[in-house]
Amino acid sequence: MEKWSGKTAIVTGASAGIGDAIVRDLVKYGINVVALARRMERLETLRDQLKDEAGKVIPIKCDVSDKASIDAAFEEIEKEVGTVQILVNNAGIALMHGIFGDDDDKTDEIISSTINTNFLGLVRMCRKAYQLMKKSDDYGIIINIGSVAGHCASFEYIINVYPGTKFAVRAVTESMRQELNKLKDTKIRVCEISPGGVDTEIGGDSMNTPEIRALIESGVFPMLKGSDISQTVLFMLMTPYEVNITEMIVKPVGEKI
Ligand SMILES: NC(=O)c1ccc[n+]([C@@H]2O[C@H](COP(=O)([O-])OP(=O)(O)OC[C@H]3O[C@@H](n4cnc5c(N)ncnc54)[C@H](OP(=O)(O)O)[C@@H]3O)[C@@H](O)[C@H]2O)c1
């Protein structure tokens, strides 16, 4: 990990769950982290909690589902840090709503924001971050957080277009890898991590009932911790520059899917 010390990472969705864990791990290795999310107060708390670590946290408000917000964040990022070497595209939402049923506007909004956050936002982040990586003329890595839902759309819960966005994340990660080959850009790697169930806030209140908590805690409903996925991010970073692990699927032992 020494090679990344003093370098700069951008982590989206840094205000909770997996993203929060990734920020906590990266700063231990002297990596400065631009932490992006909509809830600025959480990012500021994270920065304050990690102020004595080797790397610093730079909180910047950004709604990845909104192009103007991404553009504004990158103006600030360029001003604050100049260039970046690591991008972890982690921000994501999974809302439980069906596609059929009432032809209502609320469901349509959920469909749009799921696609805009999980897929379009991720692609736009890659496009913007790539420019700052090229400017640095250093080695760079993009790590996209997909899901096991990007391998198998069969779930007990109806989570709308979520699996479709995660299939798309896998596909676009491979397209980006091939495009970098065509550009003969051998300094920047693109990879994907597909987590299984992780115990975070993504399921909202439905995951916080005493019954569900009891199933998780007893191991009947096995779940990873955010830190398990951040360890996978560290593993990818530890590999030599010429090694491209294109994808890692990480499930809790005993996961049913
Ligand atoms: N938990 C799981 O079981 C699981 C499994 C497989 C894959 N994943 C993937 O892992 C990633 C992280 O999920 P998590 O489980 O850590 O969820 P989480 O605890 O709900 O955290 C989601 C993060 O994404 C951010 N976010 C959501 N919408 C955003 C937007 N429009 N703009 C900017 N940030 C946004 C949230 O920040 P703000 O609300 O402050 O903006 C939050 O920091 C997601 O891509 C998810 O699909 C999770």
Image (cartoon, rainbow, N blue to C red):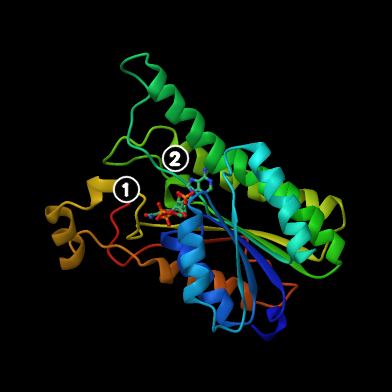
Q: Is residue 195 left or right of residue 34?
A: left
Give x and y (percent) for residue 20. 47, 65
Q: Regarding mark 2 in the picture, which secondary structure is present there?
A: helix
Q: Can you say whether 205 is above or below 47 in the image?
A: above
Type of amino acid under label 2: Pro
Q: Residues within 10 Å of mark 1 (few under 14, many from 20)?
A: some
Give x and y (percent) for residue 167. 52, 42
Type of amino acid under label 1: Gly
Give x and y (percent) for residue 70. 66, 45
Q: Can you say whether 198 is above or below 230 in the image?
A: above
Q: Which residue is mark 1?
A: 203
Q: Residue at x 31, y 17 (%)?
A: 101
Residue 92 visible in the picture: yes
Residue 238, by quadrant, is bottom right
Q: Residue at x 15, y 67 (%)?
A: 218
Residue 232 visible in the picture: no
Which one is in front in this view, the residue at disc 2 or the one at disc 1? 1
Q: Residue at x 66, y 50 (%)?
A: 174
Give x and y (percent) for residue 193. 53, 59
Mark-to-mark CA distance, 2 and 1: 14 Å
Q: Regarding mark 1 in the picture, which secondary structure is present there?
A: loop
Q: Quadrant of the N terminus?
A: bottom right
Q: Residue at x 44, y 40 (%)?
A: 163
Ligand 1 neighbours mark 1 (CB distance < 8 Å): yes
Q: Which residue is mark 2?
A: 163
Q: Is residue 147 left or right of residue 186?
A: left
Residue 184, by quadrant, is bottom right
